[in-house]
Every structure is written in structure tokens, then in C-alpha cells.
Amino acid sequence: MRLKSYEDMNLQELDVMKEISSIGTSHAATSLSKLLQKEIRISIPEVSILGYEETVERMGQMEELVAATLVQMSNEVNGLMLFVFKKDMMNAVLEKLIGKCYDSFEEIDELAYSALEEVGNIIICSYVNAFTQLVGVEIDLSVPSSTVNMLGGILTVPIAEYGYETDKLMYINAEFIMDGVRLSDGLLMLPDIKSLNSILEKLGVVS
Amino acid sequence: MTEKDLKVGIGDMKFTRGGGQIITYALGSCIGITMYDPFLKLGGLLHIMLPARADPNDPKIFKYADSGLREMIRKMTAFGMLKSRTVVKIAGGAKMFEIRGNADFGNIGQRNATMVKKILMEERMSIKAEDIGGSYARTMLLDVGNGDVIIRTAGRPEKHL
């Protein structure tokens, strides 16, 4: 394997990831727009390779409560996709879907939880579809799993899962603009290192 | 925060003497281990992420339960810690996500806990108190003045170990 870790990617390879993320983000915006019956605009996503603490800092604070949905990928690409809802995103979505807003994640009931999981899953699938279409690989997805927990604790899941391979995470940060409000879309896109190599190979990225 | 408040990141260890606090935030599947020698008021906190150091050349000693605990004991012993009077408490090892049809996923917390207990037994150190497992993150704090350990979780009252 040529790449041993996410941080080994050169600029050209990072550009490929950015391209995949851009397509994923626009797919996600389209699905979300259909679901919420709202016009949604997006910004060009940033792709960053960050350590655990840097990722937490970018997304919020260690002990901050957030909701997150996790999906496991298998078949030709193995890895994890983790979508994190912050409060503004949660309320923008829930207001449209179930007509309710919440002051904090602690108040979330069963209905809101299911709605968030569904939206998280839809967004993740949009990104995965970008992979399958662009790279031409088959990816199977697990059923989504969600939690409301401290941001720092949630991010230990991917960092521990790949802890024997890398100490870095690939963080995709785009903005959904809905009714003039900017909502940040935080996604961790984590093909395992072997899959990352084969994705880049299939796309013919040679350095 | 006073001068003596220490923050321990993931895969790290810190210890101090006399007073102040040592804190580590949001332990998920990771495990926090505190050691406290009440006679010296010497306290340390280790935050491990994985069970075993597979590569002996890996410089990140405190990332793993086996190498981390041994190094912690070595360092604190050099500062006078006696195993026989040292109080050990552990917290963390949660399973944050449950994936249906894949029971093995996210079992790392449990594997970490098993390894921490195994190493401590080999080192002949008993665990005084633990708060392990569940599906939620924990913040762990050691008061080096009196050896008190506080566990903070979202939506639950603070717990003293």
C-alpha cells in the first residue's frame, strides 16, 4: 500500500477527496431539500485531515452535547461515515419535519431522535452515492446507529476503530444555506486505509 | 483553573503532588485510570485508547493500556509511589454506537477494560472503584489534594468514585 495514513495524501489526492465531497454535499442538499420542501444552497466543502483534538476543536467543544449518526461501509470500500448534528442544524431540520424545536439535546424525545437518525442516514447515503458513482465501486451500508452524547466521546469511536492504522480523521465541512441561515454540515468520511488506496488507484490518481 | 490544574489528552498521562486537579474530558470507548498515593498526596491520570501496543517501536506509549499502565507505574514509583497503598480507580470503556447485525463493532471499550484489569492484576494493584461500560461519554477528574475522583456525564448527576 502506498498510503499508510490519511495524512500521506498529497494535494492532488486531497483534491480528489474534495471533488467526491462536493458531489456528496450537493446530493445531500438535494435530498434534504426534497425532504424539507425548502431551497437549500451549499458552500464548497473543505476537506481537512486532522488529529482527534483538532477535529473536536473545529466542530465544537469536548463536553458539548451533539447528536450523531454512524453508518458502517463494507464490500469494495470498508470504513465509517459519521454525521454530527449541532443544535442549529437539528432545529432547522426538526422544525420542518415535526414542527418542533428543542432548547438542548437533553430534551430530545423518541420522535425527534428517529427524525434526526433518518436525516443523518439520508445525508450519509448521499455522500456514499457520490463514491459509488464517481469511483465505480459497490458499497454496502449497515443500518444507521445514532447517539446523543458528548462530542469528544463520539469522536473517540472512529479514532479508536482505526487507532492501529492512523491517528487522523478526514473531516468534511460544508455549509447548507437555508432561509439565509448558514448551517454547518459536519461529516467524517473514513474509508479504511486499504480502501483509500484502492479508491485513488481506481480513479487513476498517480503521483 | 489554577496553576496546578492539569489536562490530560487522549493517549496521555500526567501526575502531580500535593494538590490541584487532573482532568480528562469525554472518555468514550477510552479508559481513564487514576492512581493516588494518599501518603505522598501523589496522583496521576492516564487516558488510554487501545488495549495493546502491537508495534514495540511505536513511541506513543500512553495510547495503549499495556505499555501505558507500566510506564505510569514506573514513573510514579520513581517519585516514591508504593503500590500497596495506592488507590486505583477506572472509568470509561463505553460502547457509543450499537450497529444491528454487527455485535462486534465498537467493542473496543470492553476490550480496553479487560486489558486494563489484566495488567493491573499482573502488577498486583487492586481497583478500588470503577465506572465502566454503558453507552455514554464520561469526564474524569482527580482531586490530588484528597484523592477524590469525580465522574461527569451528560444528563446525570455527578458521581464520586
Image (cartoon, coloured by chain):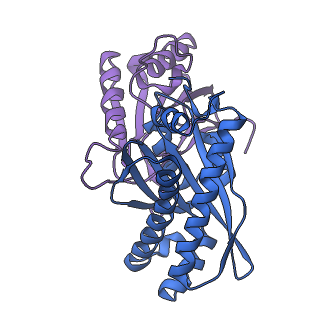
Chain colours: A blue, B purple
Q: Please tell me whether residue B7 is drawn above or below residue B133 in the rendered image.
A: above
B108 relative to A163 in the view: left or right: left
- Identify the image quadrant of the N terminus of chain B: top right
Is residue B63 shown left or right of residue A19? left
- Establish if B148 lies above or below A96: above
In this view, B52 is above or below B27: above
The percent coordinates of residue A168 (x first, y second) are 58, 36
Residue pictured at 57% horizontal, 55% vertical = A187
Toward the viewer: B89 or A156? A156
Image-quadrant location for residue B31: top left
The residue lying furthest to the bottom in this view is A99
Q: Position of residue B67 (x, y in %)?
A: 45, 18
> Residue A14's image quarter?
top right
Q: Nearer the viewer, residue A7 or B94?
A: A7
Q: Nearer the viewer, residue A161 or B1?
A: A161
Q: Residue at x 25, y 47 (%)?
A: B103
- Image spot of residue B45 (x, y percent): 53, 31
Residue B27 shows in the view: yes
Is B3 on the left or on the right of A105, as rendered? right
Q: Answer whether residue A61 is visible to the viewer in this image.
A: no
Q: Quadrant of the C terminus of chain B?
A: top left
Q: Could you tell me which residue is drawn at 54 percent across and 60 percent down? A: A84
Q: Position of residue A145 (x, y in %)?
A: 37, 59
Q: Is residue A139 above or below residue A119?
A: above
Q: Is residue A19 left or right of residue A193?
A: right
- Between B46 and A100, the residue placed more toward the observer is A100
